[in-house]
Amino acid sequence: MVEKLDDLPGYSAWDRSDMLSQLDNFVMHVKEAINYKSPSFFGISNICLCGIGGSAMCGDIIVDYLTPICNKNISVIRNVSLTKWANSGTLVVVISYSGNTKEALDIFEDSLSKGMKAICVFSGGELIKRARERNIPFILVPAGIPPRAALGYLLGSVAVVLDSAGVGGPVSAIAEVIPFARSCQEKLAPSVPISNNAAKKIAIALKDSIPSIYCPRSIRSIGVRWQNQINENAKMVAFTGEIPEMNHNQMVAWMDGKSVSNCKPVFIIPEELEPTMKKMTMVTVQMFNERGLDPVLVQLEGRSTLENLFHGLILGDMVSYYLARLREIDPTPVDVIVEFKKRIGN
């Protein structure tokens, strides 16, 4: 069965909607989007990045990158209304790839009703109508791809907005990472055989399991992205957790419970960690190994946090794609999400 991962002609017949091209375009989308334009925002003390699902993922990544270096509070809001602490110094960034997400529409109205400064990122939909009617600035990204495959456009766009608000210079930092990210994609492409392809090896290790993905808190977004992509592309149940939080609850179930079914622990480890976090991570992995739980260890490549994040994103996307290949499941359709959105829209 695993040989199909190296069967290049088989990919085109199986991947009918060509999800592979969407994943391959991630870096190109980022490079394009960091050249978009945003109006400048002044007097900003905190920022709410508002979205859900794939549209919120860009916020998680940006927050993981900026938290150690930024003196402004940046929060990802997955809700239908703003937090009570939002005030006149808050910039609300409403992110909805489709422009029709119910949560985004509600939080857009909530932010305007409270007189907040706002900007939107979308490909069209109802939000573009409302933004134009209210004279709210927006960044328009290309339409026509699955929201989870639009991460590059959304990530680059949000970086541009944050630059315009005087936050941390993410655009120049991302631009510097582009060559590294391209090299990551080349190493993980279908043309690279199993023997030299980390994503294929990880997919093989996870193919008959429920992946339980753990990351240090500093790269939490990578665990969430892996879970989401495995859920949607491979149509597999997967979960994520954080170190050190899991050391105070989930670890007990793994080690003292009678059975963990077919769950498979995965530890994603960045190149740089604070000394205490590094020790916690290493001890956790050691304890899992001592108890025969056979965790999958993923050492991220890169010389910086941002390079670690990009490598983690690209690697996780390809792991999910190869899992779908092993399961002979079309990675693109997400019919139950479509059904859910129709039901809540009625």
Image (spheres, rainbow, N blue to C red):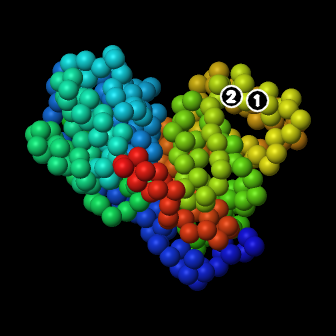
Q: Quadrant of residue 284?
A: top right
Q: Secondary structure at mark 2?
A: helix
Return the x and y of residue 198 as percentages of the image width and height. Answer: 65, 58
Q: Are marks 1 and 2 in contact (CB under 8 Å)?
A: yes
Q: Amino acid at mark 2?
A: Met
Return the x and y of residue 307 as percentages of the image width and height. Answer: 48, 45
* Residue extending furthest toward the front: 346
Q: Is residue 131 above or below residue 242?
A: below
How many neighbours does mark 2 have within 10 angstroms: few (below 14), some (14-19), or many (20 or more)? some
Residue that badge 2 annotates: 246
Q: Is residue 183 visible?
A: no
Residue that badge 1 annotates: 251
Q: How many marks?
A: 2
Q: From the viewer's perspective, tell me whether residue 176 is left or right of residue 182.
A: left
Return the x and y of residue 310 as percentages of the image width and height. Answer: 48, 48
Q: Amino acid at mark 1?
A: Met
